[in-house]
């Protein structure tokens, strides 16, 4: 399998001399869900946000490969960075929808980096974008909610819109930062089921930060365990044993 993302020597220091990410090396293949688990404050969000440059890496290379070519996200700035960001979709814990806009408009926001600004301002999206947005709303089970305001939706419905918006972008890579942390257990399963199915159908690899180890085991092909800003486990869900969990989270009284 050819790598979609190659991270080499990634270090992030919010405060000089105090690395949150310590010289990480990580390659993500072209398909499937990779779950990142680890205790609070170990740098999982920082890692995801370095990949799409919502956070500035201190050192290292973040190479994204796709049919459009290979780029080092860490080196880009200005327009090149804006264009590169279109290639990476993101799903957020708190959904990050525009509350006063309709569900449809929120999904179409995924095309913002592609359509000219005047079209977006006038809300004149190309017909094929609108058709795809309807198709995605259908796929996430919300076709009849297209004209509702985002703030009228439940958490689970909002996250479905978040997934549709991210896929609308036709990303080469999807990042999901704790996408189920604000949801109840049943809705969490529904949302992850949907994310897995849709990303699989679109052939988009997904990196997901997740606290729930059971869900990580259930949906991920690969689990990365982080502790203290470093990778301490990298393997298949079935190979993740209690001893690894102890190494990742510390202690064993909670197991
Ligand atoms: N903008 C920032 N400025 C300074 N320190 C930060 C900033 N963002 C995060 N940190 C620190 O970096 C460390 C890693 O944070 P990060 O949010 O990446 O961890 P995490 O593993 O995602 O945690 P959680 O599971 O609780 O979301 C923490 O100590 C945090 O306080």
Image (cartoon, rainbow, N blue to C red):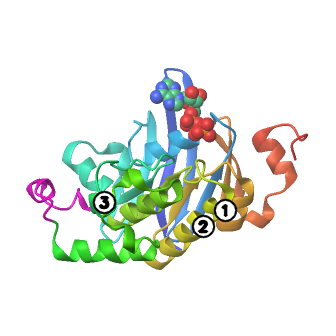
Disc assigned to residue 110: 3
When the figure is inspected, residue 47 is found, relative to residue 66, above or below; the finding is above
Disc on res. 109: none
Q: Is residue 51 magenta?
A: no
Badge 2 local density, few (<14 within 10 Å), some, or many (20+)? some
Residue at figure coordinates x 48%, y 46% from the top left: 94
Horizontal relation, residue 4 to residue 250: left or right: left
The magenta span reads: 111-124
* Residue that label 2 marks: 190
Secondary structure at badge 2 equals: helix
Crowding near pointer 3: few (<14 within 10 Å), some, many (20+)? Answer: many
Is disc 2 in contact with disc 3, using a CB cutoff of under 8 Å?
no
| Residue 184 percent location from the top left of the image | 64, 54
Q: Which residue is mark 1?
A: 186
Q: CA distance from mark 2 to mark 3?
A: 22 Å
Q: Does mark 3 have its CB less than 8 Å from ligand 1?
A: no
N-terminal of the two: label 2 or label 3? Answer: 3
Dots 2, 1 in contact, CB < 8 A: yes
- Helix, strand or loop status at disc 1: helix
């Amino acid at each position: 399998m050819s790598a979609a993302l190659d991270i080499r020597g990634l270090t992030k220091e919010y405060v000089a001399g105090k690395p949150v990410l310590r010289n990480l090396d990580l390659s993500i293949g072209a398909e499937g869900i990779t779950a990142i688990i680890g205790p609070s404050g170990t740098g999982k969000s920082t890692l995801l946000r370095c990949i799409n440059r919502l956070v500035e890496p201190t050192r290292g290379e973040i190479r994204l490969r796709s049919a459009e070519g290979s780029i080092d996200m860490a080196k880009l700035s200005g327009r090149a960075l804006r264009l590169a960001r279109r290639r990476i979709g993101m799903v957020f814990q708190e959904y990050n929808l525009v509350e006063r806009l309709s569900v449809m408009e929120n999904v179409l926001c995924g095309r913002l980096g592609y359509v000219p600004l005047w079209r977006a301002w006038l809300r004149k999206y190309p017909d094929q974008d609108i058709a795809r947005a309807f198709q995605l709303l259908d796929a996430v089970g919300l076709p009849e909610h297209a004209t509702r305001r985002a703030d009228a939706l439940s958490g689970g419905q909002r996250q479905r819109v978040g997934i549709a918006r991210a896929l609308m972008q036709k990303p080469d890579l999807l990042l999901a930062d704790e996408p189920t942390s604000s949801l109840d257990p049943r809705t969490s399963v529904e949302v992850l089921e949907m994310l897995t199915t849709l990303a699989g159908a679109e052939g988009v690899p997904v990196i997901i930060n997740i606290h729930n180890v059971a869900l990580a085991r259930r949906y991920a092909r690969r689990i990365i365990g982080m502790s203290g800003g470093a990778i301490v486990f990298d393997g298949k869900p079935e190979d993740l044993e209690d001893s690894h969990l102890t190494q990742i989270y510390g202690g064993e009284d909670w197991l």
